């Protein structure tokens, strides 16, 4: 995935917000935490370019291990169950859930080490063939990029719906 991580994070966070708004979490904080989680695994690019000098694929770093995001999500949900104030654990949970979504999206067209750190074997749903010298052009012209365009379109649709009607996607209290 090249352009769809943020839109996918927005979609997931927007769709899940109605389930958590009664816990005192603001929509903007929830969406921001989700968006940060959607791109957090790629923060390893700083290390990849400036310290590792592209010696290893950045998907082989721990920030791209699904086990890290599953563990983080599990811990945040455990804390959320025990905590009196649910706000912060829920923000951490949406961050971790979007980190895991990042893994699922990357799995479509690039290698993800699903069993790491125990087994260092990469898995990928599709292999994007190297046809062009410019790496990103291979991804832009691959059929999997259509999914990215669809995710961007869906995110724009949800964003426009919310802009036109701020109560869009918000739970309403039932009348007794």
Image (cartoon, helix red, strand yellow):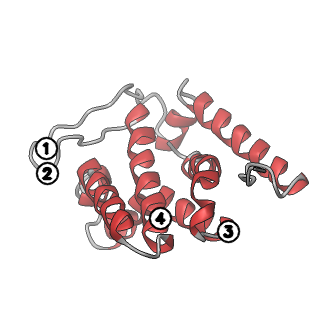
Mark 1 or mark 4: name the one nearer the start of the chain. Answer: 4
| Disc 4 target residue | 90
Residue at the right extreme, as displayed: 164
Disc 3 is placed on an element classified as helix
| Disc 2 target residue | 117
- Tag in front: 1 or 3: 3
| Disc 3 target residue | 28
**Which quadrant holds residue 58?**
bottom left
Mark 1 or mark 3: name the one nearer the start of the chain. Answer: 3
> Label 4 neighbourhood size at 10 Å, few (<14), some (14-19), many (20+)?
many
Q: Residue at x 83, y 58 (%)?
A: 166
Residue situated in front as seen by the camera: 130 or 126: 126
Q: Are marks 2 and 1 in contact (CB under 8 Å)?
A: yes
> Label 1 neighbourhood size at 10 Å, few (<14), some (14-19), many (20+)?
few
Mark pair 2, 1: CA separation: 6 Å
Disc 4 is placed on an element classified as helix
The percent position of residue 97, horizontal first and vertical second, equals 43, 52
Residue 152 left/right relative to 46: right
The percent position of residue 83, horizontal first and vertical second, equals 38, 73
Mark 4 or mark 2: name the one nearer the start of the chain. Answer: 4
Asked if 124 appears above or below 66 in the picture, the reply is above
Residue situated in front as seen by the camera: 109 or 81: 81
Mark pair 1, 4: CA separation: 31 Å
Mark pair 4, 2: CA separation: 26 Å
> What count of labels does the image hold?
4
Please tell me the numbered disc located at residue 120.
1
Residue 13 left/right relative to 46: right
Asked if 102 appears above or below 76 in the picture, the reply is above
């Amino acid at each position: 995935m090249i352009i769809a991580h943020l839109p996918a994070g927005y979609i997931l966070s927007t769709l899940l917000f109605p389930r958590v708004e009664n816990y005192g979490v603001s929509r903007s904080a929830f969406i921001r935490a989700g968006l940060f989680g959607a791109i957090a695994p790629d923060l390893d690019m700083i290390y990849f370019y400036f310290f590792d000098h592209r010696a290893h694929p950045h998907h082989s770093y721990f920030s791209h291990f699904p086990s890290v995001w599953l563990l983080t999500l599990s811990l945040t949900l455990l804390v959320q169950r025990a905590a009196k104030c649910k706000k912060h654990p829920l923000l951490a949970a949406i961050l971790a859930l979007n980190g895991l979504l990042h893994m699922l999206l990357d799995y479509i067209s690039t290698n993800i080490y699903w069993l790491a750190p125990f087994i260092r074997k990469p898995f990928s749903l599709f292999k994007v063939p190297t046809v062009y010298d410019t790496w990103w052009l291979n991804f832009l012209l691959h059929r999997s990029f259509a999914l990215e365009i669809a995710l961007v379109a869906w995110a724009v649709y949800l964003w426009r719906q919310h802009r036109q009607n701020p109560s869009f996607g918000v739970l309403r209290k039932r009348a007794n």
